[in-house]
Image: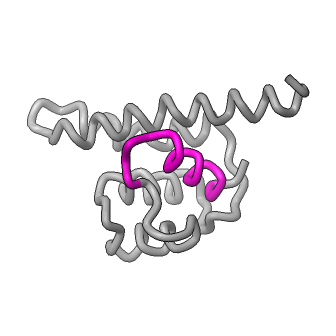
Amino acid sequence: MTLGELLQYLEDHTDYDILDGTPAETVARSKDGSHKNAYAAEVVTSALAKLGIDSADDVIERVPFVNALAPVRLKYMADDAPVEGFRLVEKVIATTDAAFNEEVLAQKGK
């Protein structure tokens, strides 16, 4: 699965504004700070940095992607952090798991 495919899945399966335009535009806007949802942008930029990727076309794997979100997750687990950030990160992690589960089942023809 590419980062762009995952971002589209997250947009389609959560109540959050993950995308800001196309997946490629979302990556660009996350990088330059103009994404309409700062929490989603932080998820994207954390993934880019930790995975060493820079494009929506880059292939990602489940475990490294979720692990890349650990610093953001810990940030929003703090007592003084905005609960909205924590909710978004938790939903992204759970929905990412569902996306990869669907991909595996599709590959197995089920």
Note whether 96 is above or below 25 in the view shown.
above
Note whether 32 is above or below 46 in the view shown.
below
Image-based side of 97 in relation to 33, left or right: right
Q: Residue furthest right?
A: 109
Nearest to the observer: residue 54 or residue 110: 110
| Picture coordinates of residue 42, whole percent (x, y) | 36, 55
Rendered residue at 45%/38% (across/down)? 92
| Picture coordinates of residue 88, whole percent (x, y) | 34, 40
Note whether 33 is above or below 77 in the view shown.
below
Q: Is residue 36 magenta?
A: no
Rendered residue at 53%/59% (across/down)? 48
Residue 99 location, quadrant: top right
Q: Is residue 14 magenta?
A: yes
Rendered residue at 50%/58% (across/down)? 49
Residue range in magenta is: 3-17
Residue 54 location, quadrant: bottom right
Q: Residue furthest top?
A: 110
**On the rendered image, what quadrant is the C terminus found in?**
top right
Note whether 72 is above or below 55 in the view shown.
above
The kind of secondary structure the magenta stretch mainly shows is helix
Image-based side of 61 in relation to 69, left or right: right
Q: Residue furthest left?
A: 80
Image-based side of 49 in relation to 43, left or right: right
Nearest to the observer: residue 58 or residue 94: 94
Rendered residue at 52%/73% (across/down)? 25
| Picture coordinates of residue 96, whole percent (x, y) | 56, 36
| Picture coordinates of residue 104, whole percent (x, y) | 78, 29
